[in-house]
Image (cartoon, helix red, strand yellow):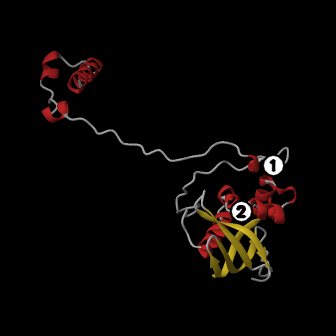
Amino acid sequence: MRLSGLLIVIVLISAACNLSTNEVANLPTAPASLATSTLAKPTRTPIPFDNQVHPTQLVASGTLPPPPLPLTLPAQNGTINASTTPDQAVKDYYALVSQGRYDLGWSMLTDAFKQKFNCCAPNYNYTDYVGWWDTVNTVEIRSVKTVSQTGDHAVVYVEFSYVMNDGRRSALVGDPYIALVYDSTLNMWRFDDKRATA
């Protein structure tokens, strides 16, 4: 099949170039291995993805929820490790929002955290969450340490400050203890609370 296709191409090219039949006959032929070789088709591995809207994703009118996330998330360049330590989850979160990956950062917050802190914005919605983080250039972390972990609950101490887009730098954030819960559905640690003491 490939050899006949190659001959058709040669005939078309020869016609376009005004080559004679003798000149076409003198063109090199394709090796026999080309006529019988086949390329292996790449295999595709399906990735589980839940694209249904859940009641917890519904937000105030006029705002859009973040896009649904795959259950397993890659580990580099603005994505999160699905199986990580609590202190690494805190580092990952602030790295993600510093990179503008608010969709992934949002997924690392429990509904309880979003409700309690309005996630840096009124009305507990994703649009205002993005609006807040768009004013922050980067988050500078001085230190991160897991201070307790029992089962699917952990507390992480983190010293950090915000560097705003206009160059201002905040003092160290006053609630340095982050309570996390392990979400076995998403296979990752999620922010559940922040407070001044462990």
Residue 113 image offset from top left, x and y in percent: 77, 64
> How far apart are the alpha carbons under marks 2 and 1?
15 Å
Q: Which mark is residue 2?
A: none
Quarter of the figure with residue 26: top left
Is 18 left, or right, of 183 in this rendering?
A: left
Residue 195 versus residue 110 in the image, above or below: below
Secondary structure of the residue carrying numbered label 1: loop
Q: Which residue is mark 2?
A: 109
Residue 17 image offset from top left, x and y in percent: 27, 21
Residue at x 55% of width, y 64% of height: 81
Residue 18 versus residue 88 in the image, above or below: above
Residue 163 image offset from top left, x and y in percent: 74, 73
Is 36 left, or right, of 69 in this rendering?
A: left
Quadrant showing the C terminus: bottom right
Q: Earlier in the sequence, mark 2 or mark 1?
A: 1
Q: Callout 1 environment at 10 Å: few (<14), some (14 to 19), or many (20+)?
A: some
The amino acid pointed to by label 2 is Leu
